[in-house]
Image (tube, helix red, strand yellow):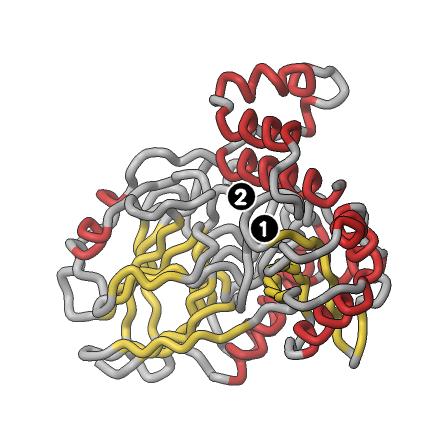
Amino acid sequence: MESIRFFHVADLHLDSPFKGLKHLPNEVFERIQNSTFVSFDKVVKEAIARQIDFMIISGDLFDEEDRSIRAQAKLLKQCNLLRANNIPVYVIHGNHDHLGSHRLELDMPDNIHIFREETEVKQHITNNGTMVDIAGFSYGSRHIKERRIAGYPKRTGDRYMIGILHGSEGSIHSSHETYAPFSIDELLEKKYHYWALGHIHDRRILHEEPFIVYPGNIQGRHRKETGPKGCYEVVLNQHHTELTFIPTHDLMWEVCNVSLQGTERFGEVFQRIHQSMDSMTGDRLIEIVLTDVESLSQEMRVRIENGDLLEALQSDYEWQGELKWVHSIRKGSANIGLGSEQDPFKQEVMLTLQAMTGDEWEEVLAELYEHPSIYRFLDPLEGDDKNSLIEETEHLLHNKG
């Protein structure tokens, strides 16, 4: 068998609403809001430049069930570009963009091959005549809690076989809800040449030869999704697999650690942070983590706590032609605030939220879900949604001082 070359992409989350960021200046928010589209544009440009045989997208092309026409139109444009360059795309839908959602759909070109709700195998023949079997399924509803790996056929022939699966590996601790769970051993039993996973937004290689891979998402969507984001180019032959990570993010969420040792004046703190940020290249959304703050005067602590420092940094968010937006400032540990002790009220709020059970969440939110004018706009609250609420609450408490 001759080698094959393909892209493994997952979790595009096109048209992500970027909750909690609408308070930003319009030009900054618009840039963030368009970042998922720009990132997928980069994926497609790289695919064309590298002349890949095909592309795999392992679920969650869209961020919401009622995917916007804007998001579909952007996707359609890129799919037509791939079609013009003879690049087919094999797609499964995940929990965010499942097949059972109510939506108005645009027709996709014939190079887009979408897997149905039941596990199926699609055959691809490359330009050099190499045959590839690709197995997968799309989510028929948002909640797929059962194991689906038994439905994947075991490889029996001498053709390449690739599995696509949007789900959760059992040993991974993640803020994402557990869907379509599986174990590495279950995947290995199928004797596939490659497993193209989706759902977990961290880039992880769970096994090598055969490779079992989460590529992560193509664009970080919040401050917890730091670092480079992108996809993998996979070159596969009978005896070896070569993976190349391709960064595609438009904006990178990043943590910047700044030591305040020896600083005495507000201007010195401001300059110290600027010096640390000057070493960053590319457009960044930055969380400043202050260390060595013990020697700061009470006046300095107050000016940092009351938002003066954050406001000063945000007023100068673009320099040297690059976007550098500081979205938050915190002490080096996970503590809220810069004092030696946490605010008891803030601490109690966070501990209460973290300890709440599913029933308690439902009770607290019952009034919203039962409101006659609101309920139809709300989806059921899931594990990743709860974690996002907790993180956003911590973020707001910290920055309000």
On the image, the x and y values in percent for residue 346 come to: 65, 32
Asked whether the viewer can see residue 384, the reply is yes
Q: Is residue 285 left or right of residue 44?
A: right
The answer, for residue 22, to whether it is visible in the render is: no
Above or below: residue 45 compared with residue 398:
below
Per the image, the residue denoted by label 1 is 62
Name the residue nearer the viewer: 265 or 387.
265
Task: Give left or right: position of 106 versus 325.
Answer: left
Image vertical order of residue 380 relative to residue 131, above or below: above
Proximity of marks 1 and 2: CB atoms separated by less than 8 Å: yes
In which quadrant will I find the N terminus? Answer: bottom left
In the depicted structure, whether residue 207 falls above or below residue 379: below
Residue at 49% x, 26% y is 355
Percent coordinates x, y for residue 67 in the rendering: 64, 46
> In the picture, residue 108 is in which quadrant?
bottom right
Q: Which residue is mark 2?
A: 96
Q: Is residue 279 above or below residue 34?
A: below
Q: Amino acid at mark 2?
A: His
Q: At 58% across and 59% down in the image, what residue appears?
A: 220
Quadrant position of residue 291: bottom right
Disc 1 packing (10 Å; few <14; some 14–19; many ≥20): many
Q: Nearer the viewer, residue 217 or 291?
A: 291
Task: Report how many numbered discs are placed on residues in the image.
Answer: 2
